[in-house]
Amino acid sequence: QEWERVTSESKMLKMQLERIDPAKILLVEDVPNDVELIKLALENHKVVNQIDVVTDGEQALNYLHELSSSGLPVRDLPRLTLLDLKLPKIDGITVLERIRNEPRTRDLVVGPCPKLGLELGGRKSVIVDV
């Protein structure tokens, strides 16, 4: 009976650790204009999910791995993470490696941020196809 109790508690803890919020998208992007353009593109494609934004690799890892004082995750995982590869503090490739090395985030859906702009003569011009 003790074994069943421990097994049940273990399963419940695992479910708490692996919770995913199906309505949430994490956007990891450090360029404010790109953040706004990505949000606009998602809105134009009728994506109505909650979009949480962090602006560097360190913030992204804290968002995904932060634990409460009781050792449980502070927030549910997002359904999708859009990750810029050129980030301050910790680059996107390193962020992705750390996501894949953690059991809780190993299966998280991660995609690259769409390239929205093109540098022309020192000014950013919008590319309309997203």
Image: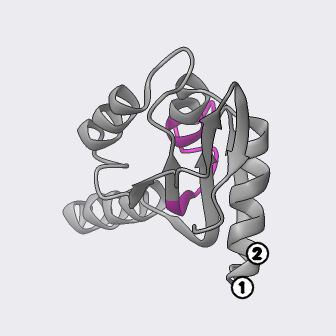
Disc 2 packing (10 Å; few <14; some 14–19; many ≥20): few
Name the residue carrying label 2: 43
Residue 65 against residue 41 in the figure, above or below: above
Q: Position of residue 7 (x, y in %)?
A: 25, 63
Mark 2 in CB contact with mark 1 (< 8 angstroms): yes
On screen, residue 48 versus residue 69, left or right, reads right
- Distance between the Cα atoms at labels 2 and 1? 5 Å
The disc labelled 1 sits on which kind of residue?
A: Lys
**Residue at image location 58% in from the left, 57% down from the top:** 76
**Residue at image location 28% in from the left, 34% down from the top:** 97
Name the residue carrying label 1: 46
The disc labelled 2 sits on which kind of residue?
A: Glu
Q: Which residues are magenta?
A: 63-80
Magenta span has 59? no
Residue furthest bottom in the image? 46
**Residue at image location 41% in from the left, 65% down from the top:** 15
Magenta span has 75? yes
Q: Quadrant of residue 24?
A: bottom right
Instruction: Classify the position of the N terminus by image quarter.
Output: bottom left
* Residue 29 visible, this angle: no
Q: Nearer the viewer, residue 87 or 63?
A: 87
Magenta segment, prevailing SS (helix, strand or loop): loop
Residue 13 against residue 73 in the figure, above or below: below
Q: Quadrant of residue 93?
A: top left
* Residue 46 visible, this angle: yes
Instruction: Classify the position of the C terminus by image quarter.
Output: bottom right
Q: Position of residue 67 (x, y in %)?
A: 56, 35
Q: Position of residue 115 (x, y in %)?
A: 53, 50
**Residue at image location 49% in from the left, 64% down from the top:** 19
Helix, strand, or loop for circle 1?
loop
Helix, strand, or loop for circle 2?
helix
